[in-house]
Image (cartoon, rainbow, N blue to C red):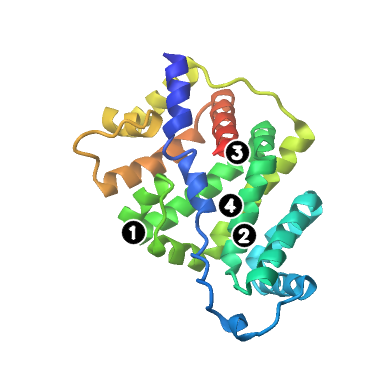
Amino acid sequence: MLIERVLALAAAAVVAICLGVGLLMMALVPPKPGGGPLAALSGPIDKGTARQMVETAIAQTPEYARFFARLRETFTQDYESALDEFATRLSDTKLEQSVDYYLSEAVRRLRQSRGALAAKAEPDAMSRVFAKQLEVLQAVAREDKKMCVAFLYGATNLDFQRFAAAQRPLVADMSTASLDAMVSGQAKNIARAQPNEADFKTLETALQARGLGKAEIDALLDGKMPDPPLDDAKMCAAGQTYLEVLRTLPEASRTRIYGLALELMSKS
């Protein structure tokens, strides 16, 4: 039973994993070749100029600039690698990307290179990651329940992309919380066991106490969507309840579940 639950969580823990993926997919669709003011330039853009343009775009967005400054301070190699890639792409294609793309791509790259460290962070650092995820989910829910459900499953559309670009402080805070958890994990390197059957039982009991039925709990923990599926408002509310309940669990259970979710995020 335990291994089945862990595998189900790995495959379809709707909120804990896909929520993180959704945030990394927020960037606006890159412009098509031939668009944008740079397309009129006849010659190539040298890489140094392209790098300056990227850095200027980031500096003009204070919320994101703080994240990139923290990234440069803590994981300098990752910062330089990301900025070099952005500059090379701009130099080669003359296609300007949105600053939202720069943030989401930097976080995606960081998650792949350093994400597993977050699972070894101090409890408070891990808790902040999920607290910021909840804040974003609540903001999405206020905007559109259907978009909220799509976000839970890691799917995005233009409505969500526009929403994310309009909510840069929230997105930047969640990205920084993830970065800080990786920094903490690198420093503390806390080894944690995977959640056990008692942890999942504690979580299920807490979800039931908050009014969630079997259909909602199965959808959240095992990815088992009923037929007919839950309506958008109910599923959106269940996702928020899930994250709210997680932070009320005993620390040992909570940190094991957080740790597994963060580890799986790094592999997604």
Give the number of the mark in front: 4 or 3.
3
Q: Quadrant of residue 241?
A: top left
Residue furthest left in the image: 228
In the rendered image, the vertical position of residue 135 relative to residue 216, given as above or below: below
Q: Would you name the residue on which mark 1 appears?
A: 144
In the rendered image, the vertical position of residue 211 relative to residue 237, given as above or below: above
- Label 2 and label 3: CA atoms lie apart by 17 Å
Q: Would you name the residue on which mark 4 appears?
A: 174
Q: Earlier in the sequence, mark 2 or mark 1?
A: 2
User: Which amino acid is tagged 3?
Assistant: Ser
Q: Which SS class for mark 1? A: loop
> Is residue 177 something one can see in this rendering?
no
User: Which amino acid is tagged 4?
Assistant: Met
- Label 1 and label 4: CA atoms lie apart by 20 Å
Disc 4 crowd rating (10 Å Cα; few below 14, some 14-19, many 20+) is: many
Q: Quadrant of the N terminus?
A: top left
In the rendered image, the vertical position of residue 8 relative to residue 45, given as above or below: above
Q: Residue at x 55, y 64 (%)?
A: 168
Question: Where's residue 25, x and y in %?
Answer: 50, 54
Q: Which mark is residue 69?
A: none
Q: Earlier in the sequence, mark 4 or mark 3?
A: 4
Q: In the image, 96: left or right of 183?
A: left
- Label 4 and label 3: CA atoms lie apart by 15 Å
Q: Would you name the residue on which mark 2 appears?
A: 103
